[in-house]
Image: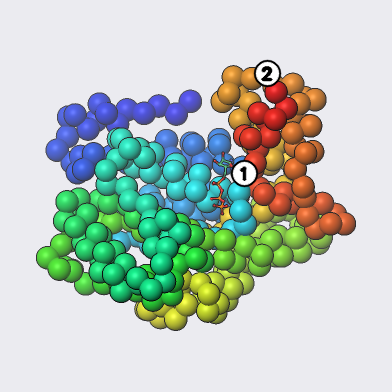
Amino acid sequence: FCWDLRSLRCSFSDACECRFQPDLEGLGCDLAQNVFGQHLARELLLQAVTDFVELAEPLKPLVLSFHGWTGTGKTYVSSLVVKHLYLDGSRSPFVHQFSPTLHFPHAERIEQYKDDLKRWIQGNLSTCARSIFLFDEMDKMHPGLIDVIVPFLGSSWIVFGTNYRKAIFIFVSNAGGEQINHVTLEFWRARKDREEMELRDLELAISKAVFDNPHNGFWQSQIIDEQLIDYLVPFLPLKRNHVKQCVKSELKQQDLPLEENLLQSVTDSITYFPEEEQIFSSTGCKTVASRINFFF
Ligand SMILES: Nc1ncnc2c1ncn2[C@@H]1O[C@H](COP(=O)(O)OP(=O)(O)OP(=O)(O)O)[C@@H](O)[C@H]1O
């Protein structure tokens, strides 16, 4: 069980800046128990977040970029980070999410979006230095837009009168997903244990795929030129056994019986690739919840 004693601690301490009260043990516990098939993302993230929040005066904000195929847990893992950093979890007013298709849909308004985004981040950081900014679908972001946040990501002390070094920025995208899938498949074909995969097996493939792509929000971005991303976090394609674990955990959450037949039927109803070997789920665990409803 993961105990959460933060409320208690928070009420006795002055250190509860913006109700930011990291529960790193809880985060580690949740990642280990509830995130399947992602040993690299789990380890890297826990280490990065731990190192960062333990610094009272960090030298720069923490900047993470999540990459991987659809339904592999990128959004889910971000929600766990938020849940374990703020007492109010995702309801915290200091957690901000941007999605290009929702917030920046019109290419011709890019100059306006640049101003808005800069002011928005600056304003939020003045209210609370311990803010989190999540940028979804980075592969759909207009190149150029994201560069307005460059001044907030580096290590100069004060930007526009705000101390911003305590913020966390998380970029999420499918970019690099195919390359990650390819390397993972090669591992499987070589009969190597998936857990033996190391970051260095993937890093080069991801950075090439992401940063050399003119359609990506990071294309020719100063964020890359100035090396402002601290960690590229890879999410591996999920195998049948991981999908089965997702089905099991969804059944538990919905208080439904854990019948082996049902578990197997839902797991088998998903499509797998490549066509010959059928190893990885083409939608990760994304459609699991809706499929369970279909079987009832
Ligand atoms: N590795 C995983 N472990 C446990 N559950 C998972 C995992 N991956 C996905 N899920 C489940 O599937 C749902 C959808 O996953 P999620 O939204 O995190 O995918 P994603 O990687 O962000 O996909 P996309 O790139 O399409 O946005 C989650 O809410 C979670 O319930």
Residue that appears at 65% across and 41% down? 287
Residue that appears at 63% across and 26% down? 251
* Residue 111 occupies quadrant: bottom left
Residue type highlighted by circle 1: Lys
Residue that appears at 70% across and 23% down? 296
- Residue 185, image x, y percentages: 75, 60
- Per the image, the residue denoted by label 2 is 257
Number of residues whose C-alpha sits closer than 10 Å to that of mark 2, classed few (under 14), some (14–19) or many (20 or more): few
- Residue 209, image x, y percentages: 59, 73
Q: Is residue 57 left or right of residue 142?
A: left
Instruction: Tell me if I can see residue 50 in this picture.
Output: yes
- Residue 55, image x, y percentages: 27, 54
Identify the secondary structure beneath mark 1: loop
Q: Is residue 82 left or right of residue 262?
A: left
Q: Nearer the viewer, residue 155 or 273?
A: 273
Q: Is residue 145 left or right of residue 182?
A: left
Above or below, comparing residue 277 to residue 116 in the picture: above
**Residue furthest right as drawn:** 276
Q: Quadrant of ligand 1?
A: top right
- Residue 89, image x, y percentages: 35, 37
* Residue 224 occupies quadrant: bottom left
Give me the C-alpha separation between circle 1 and circle 2: 21 Å
- Per the image, the residue denoted by label 1 is 286
Number of residues whose C-alpha sits closer than 10 Å to that of mark 1, classed few (under 14), some (14–19) or many (20 or more): some
Residue that appears at 68% across and 18% down? 257
Instruction: Tell me if I can see residue 165 in this picture.
Output: no
Some atom of ligand 1 lies within 8 Å of the CB belonging to the residue at label 1: yes
- Which numbered mark, 1 or 2, is in the foreground of this view? 1
Earlier in the chain: of badge 1 and badge 2, it is: 2
